[in-house]
Image: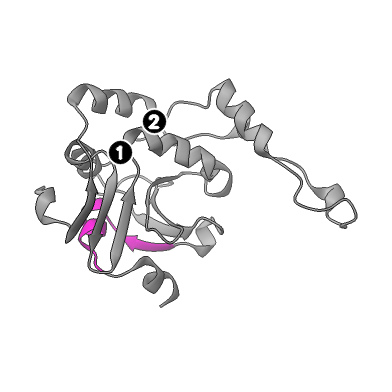
Amino acid sequence: MEWDNVFGISYQKQPGLTEAELEQFIQSWHKPLTEPEIDEIISRQRNPFPVAHPLHAQYAPFDPGLWSIPHKALPASYLDFLCYSNGGEFVNGERYFQFFSAAELRPMLLAYEFPEYMPGAVPFAMDGSGNHYIWNMRMERDALEYPILVSHSGNLGYEDSIVIAGSFPELCHGTTSVDDELHG
């Protein structure tokens, strides 16, 4: 794909991944959680309810040791994009993209606790307004692509997500804002 012709504005194009960096990313992004990752996630958990609140006693932290990350191939179009720009910020019409770099994809997936709230989902970008662009990897790929959902970071869940595109190229060519799609 001719990525220079896809986006209307390139605010922050990054150097692309080398073949060796791309191969390292392909092999590592979906590995099981490490003990340090599990420990870090556990250390962040706090009971959100004050002691006097009736739900305080019902709070139970989740166990990230039970999480799994989809062990599926990423779309070739996305991998091609990473070779063009390893992350970066782009705009097409009213649609804004803040693509995660290869080094950011896994940390963002874990920081937002996607395996807990949206098992089988993998975020790869945001829109600048708190919305995530997410591959729905719960099902098999169609034509080497996954449906792309959007969901707000403060309300992650399949029930409040919408399908915004059937493929990564379709998403990138779209011009409507995510907020218009979610709330239009």
Return the residue found at the far front.
11
Looking at the rendered image, the disc whose residue lies closer to the viewer, 1 or 2, is: 2
Q: Residue at x 41, y 59 (%)?
A: 150
Q: Residue at x 61, y 30 (%)?
A: 40
Q: Residue at x 35, y 44 (%)?
A: 140
Q: Is residue 180 left or right of residue 43?
A: left
Q: Nearer the viewer, residue 13 or 178?
A: 13
Q: Residue at x 58, y 23 (%)?
A: 36
Type of residue at label 1? Leu
Q: Nearer the viewer, residue 20 or 157?
A: 20
Residue 178 counted in the magenta span: no
Range of magenta residues: 162-175
**Residue 74: mark in rendering:** 1
Decide: is 89 above or below 16: below
Residue 86 lies in quadrant: top left
The residue to which callout 2 is attached is 29
Decide: is 27 above or below 49: above
